């Protein structure tokens, strides 16, 4: 059905610049794309297993355009073709499939829901090696192997990691295990894979699969492979810009962005407003909209304390964690005569100080928007839209783990999985619009009815093939004697 509904010859011009005109004929681009789709349709993560299944599956052979006597490509040919092609070709193929979904009316465009998930990389935690201190080089690097990367973390970050590891050793001194971090260790087999973990789950080397899903029919409008050692908020603007550009190219507009609390930050709130987009991203619990007893005045950018004294803006600084903050200070003379000075400012400080983010106005507007009925509905929409899509990709579309190495290899696998997911939706709604097609089959021969009756009465479905053949011969003799 899919072969008759979609013109796969569109992919040939995309692959033409990367194919040689002479020499022996290469793998047909259409066959290559179809093999990638079958790999994710059948929830397979290995090229070898894919070709083994295709050798015996008549439906897959017909989809690829191969007859029974024609040999299929080798699995190594499929792997080498994937490695040779750049990520941009896979992205263009994915954009074409999104365009087909837009033509079918499956994409509204205005509301995009964002989320991410860790996808296990093709690397082992037990093979991690430490990075070199001080940017030193290996004494005698082996020919053909990657050079050991140096430690690029700041001394403050390294001391923080050491204190964290010391606390773990003190809490569980007898527990075996290697204490590792992305700042101090790397994977020799896949240097771009990062150590990732979630609460209650073991650590693993992984990539981050960032997706953008349309709220109308849950079509994937963008997918990308990111490194797994950064917060989700670092990737928000890149996902938004890529999704907006793709939808604009296909003639669609984007107005609303919905995401979970992992994508919050004042910079993101500000940039979404600068792009003319309405965001529904819940702020983290660390943000305080109000300070007990203190009143903020936005026009003068100052606080008023319970005693009526003013705390004016002092300066903008960066804390040790790298977060920008604004400092507000009262006059030392006002705090000196205040009856609540010790409870308010403490014993050592000369004046009361308050700090808040430079993006307080953006935070307050976001919280006000989320408190409305539309905001609450958008948060429910997020859980019902993007989470089932990510769960389906991981469980049913071959993203349990990545068989390809490197961020580029991971991106190619993600694009192929998203193409398969969107094509299934396209085919389903295409069949609904065309209506169900009923094929009238001729009435079966009385011999078939008789054979079916004997098979059911003798429970031959779980018997060996020899027993089934003996039954068929007995039924043939019985049928020829009485008919």
Image (cartoon, rainbow, N blue to C red):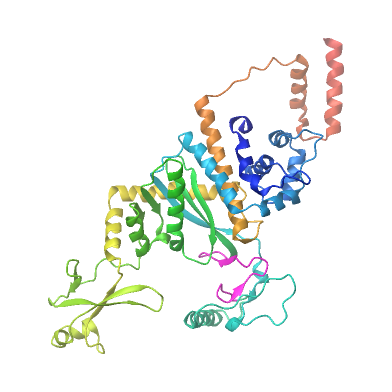
**Is residue 398 something that shows in the picture?**
yes
Residue 372 falls left or right of residue 405? left
Depth order, front residue of 103/346? 103
Q: Which residue reaches farthest top?
A: 483
Q: Is residue 284 visible?
A: no
Q: Which residue is more in the foreground, 439 or 482?
A: 439
Task: Decide which of 347, 389 is in the foreground and name it.
Answer: 389
What x and y, as percent, mark residue 94? 55, 45
From what the image shows, is residue 328 above or below residue 462?
A: below
Q: Is residue 385 magenta?
A: no
Left or right? Give the position of 68 relative to 16.
right
- Range covered by the magenta-colored residues: 179-202
Could you say where residue 379 lies in the image, as x and y percent from the top left? Answer: 37, 51
Residue 377 horizontal side relative to residue 444, left or right? left
The answer to which image quadrant residue 301 occupies is bottom left
* Residue that sits furthest to the front in the current view: 22
Q: Is residue 176 above or below residue 467?
A: below
| The N terminus - image quarter | top right
In x, y percent, where is residue 3? Answer: 63, 32
Provide the major secondary structure of the magenta segment: loop
The image shows residue 297 at horizontal and vertical percentages of: 18, 68
Residue at 52% x, 37% y is: 100
Q: Is residue 285 above or below residue 31?
A: below
What quarter of the picture does the C terminus occupy?
top right
Quarter of the rendering containing residue 367: bottom left
In the figure, residue 145 lies in which quadrant? bottom right
Residue at horizontal 45 percent and vertical 44 percent from the top: 249
Question: Observer-nearest residue: 7 or 417?
Answer: 7
């Amino acid at each position: 059905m899919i072969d008759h509904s979609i013109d796969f010859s569109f992919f040939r011009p995309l692959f033409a610049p990367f194919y040689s005109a002479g020499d022996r004929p290469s793998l047909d681009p259409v066959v290559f794309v179809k093999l990638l789709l079958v790999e994710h349709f059948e929830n397979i993560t290995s090229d070898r297993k894919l070709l083994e299944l295709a050798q015996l599956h008549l439906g897959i052979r017909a989809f690829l355009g191969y007859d029974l006597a024609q040999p299929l490509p080798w699995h190594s040919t499929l792997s080498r073709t994937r490695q040779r092609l750049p990520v941009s070709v896979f992205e263009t193929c994915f954009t074409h499939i999104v365009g087909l979904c837009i033509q079918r009316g499956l994409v509204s465009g205005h509301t995009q829901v964002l989320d991410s998930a860790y996808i296990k990389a093709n690397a082992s935690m037990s093979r991690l090696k430490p990075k070199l201190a001080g940017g030193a080089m290996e004494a005698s690097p082996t020919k053909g192997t990657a050079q050991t990367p140096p430690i690029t973390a700041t001394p403050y970050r390294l001391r923080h990691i050491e204190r964290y590891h010391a606390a773990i050793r003190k809490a569980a001194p007898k527990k075996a295990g290697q204490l590792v971090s992305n700042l101090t260790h790397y994977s020799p087999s896949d240097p771009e894979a990062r150590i990732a973990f979630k609460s209650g789950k073991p650590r693993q080397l992984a990539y981050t699969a960032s997706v953008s899903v349309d709220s109308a029919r849950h079509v994937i409008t963008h997918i990308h492979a990111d490194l797994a050692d950064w917060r989700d908020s670092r990737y928000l603007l890149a996902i938004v810009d890529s999704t907006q550009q793709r939808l604009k190219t296909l003639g669609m507009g984007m107005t609303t962005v919905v995401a979970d609390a992992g994508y919050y930050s004042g910079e993101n709130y500000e940039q979404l407003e600068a792009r003319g987009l309405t965001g529904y991203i819940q702020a983290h619990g660390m943000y305080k909209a109000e300070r007990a007893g203190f009143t903020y005045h936005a026009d003068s950018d100052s606080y008023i304390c319970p005693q009526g004294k003013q705390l004016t803006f002092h300066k903008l600084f960066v804390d040790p964690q790298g977060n920008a903050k604004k400092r507000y200070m009262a006059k030392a003379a006002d705090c000196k005569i205040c009856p609540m000075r010790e409870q308010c400012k403490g014993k050592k400080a000369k004046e009361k100080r308050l700090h808040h983010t430079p993006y307080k106005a953006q935070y307050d507007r976001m919280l006000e928007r989320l408190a409305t009925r539309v905001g609450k509905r958008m948060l429910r929409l997020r859980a019902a839209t993007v989470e089932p899509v990510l769960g389906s990709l991981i469980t049913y579309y071959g993203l349990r783990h990545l068989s390809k190495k490197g961020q580029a290899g991971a991106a190619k696998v993600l694009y192929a999985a998203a193409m398969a997911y969107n094509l299934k939706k396209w085919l389903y709604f295409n069949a609904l619009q065309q209506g169900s097609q009923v094929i009238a089959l001729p009435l079966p021969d009385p011999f078939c009815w008789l054979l079916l009756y004997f098979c059911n009465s003798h429970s031959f479905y779980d018997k060996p093939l020899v027993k089934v053949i003996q039954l068929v011969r007995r039924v043939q003799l019985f049928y020829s004697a009485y008919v």
